[in-house]
Image (tube, rainbow, N blue to C red):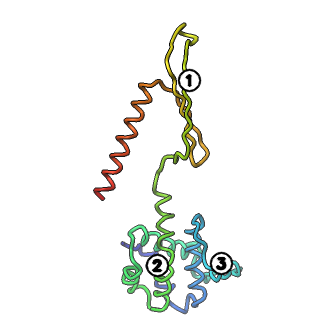
Amino acid sequence: MELNASCKHILTALSEDQYFDEQTFKQLVNVSILSILKTSTKPLSEQIQEMISNNTTPLVPTTFDQKAVQSAIVYLLLEASKHDMAAIELTHLLEDHFVNRQRLNYLSQEYETYKKDIRECVLKQKTFSFPEIVQLDWRLDYVLKTSELKQVHEPVYTLRFKCKDGQEATISCNAEQLQDLHSKIRDATKQVERTFEQM
């Protein structure tokens, strides 16, 4: 994983007491994690949430841009989770930039604590998925005639798919089309099973 020059500069400054005191550093890390996890189901600890809600003053000294500092931390955490880095690997990567070993350990511990949730957020943003079907209703009708044809005498299947997100889709097909749909679903299921076996 490669860090850009501005990110390295900010991380080095975060390590130094002359720019950021201990509480401000921890608060910046926690706020950055919170901004990543805002869609996650796992809540942050009460201590972190209280620290964030109590903050009314800017966290960053005037020599730094708060958005740039937070962006650097968020970038670091997202890239580390994208590469599935362990906390120890993150520590080794940042050793050259962090003079303060205690802060480096804190950042690594917080990363390790929320790594799984951060990875889920990254995957949600990068993964496309079709709606999940949660219910299937079907009905069999026997059609005697249509407006175009006087006599049909054919069964027609009506399938209604309900998705997890509330969408519905309805299709009608004859027995041959239903059989074809069934065989395609069976083939797709076998292909997915084969793919998982190879992993």
Labels 2 & 3 near each other (Cβ < 8 A)? no
Labels 1 & 2 near each other (Cβ < 8 A)? no
| Crowd around label 1: few <14 · some 14–19 · many ≥20 (10 Å) | few
Q: Position of residue 158 (x, y in %)?
A: 54, 29
Would you say 142 lies left or right of 99 here? Answer: right
Q: Position of residue 103 (x, y in %)?
A: 49, 88
Residue carrying label 1: 141
Nearer to me, 62 or 180: 180
Query: Element at badge 1?
Result: strand
Query: Element at badge 3?
Result: helix
Residue carrying label 3: 49
Which of the two labelled residues, at mark 2 and mark 3, occupies the earlier sequence position? 3
How many discs appear? 3
Would you say 166 lies left or right of 174 here? Answer: right
Amino acid type shown at disc 3:
Gln
CA gap, disc 1 and disc 2 = 57 Å
**Relative to 168, does residue 104 appear above or below in the rendering?**
below
Q: Position of residue 121 (x, y in %)?
A: 51, 64
Nearer to me, 190 or 3: 190
Would you say 39 lies left or right of 153 here? Answer: right
CA gap, disc 2 and disc 3 = 18 Å
Query: Element at badge 2?
Result: helix
User: Which residue: 30% across, 59% down?
Assistant: 199
User: Which residue: 54% across, 27% down?
Assistant: 140
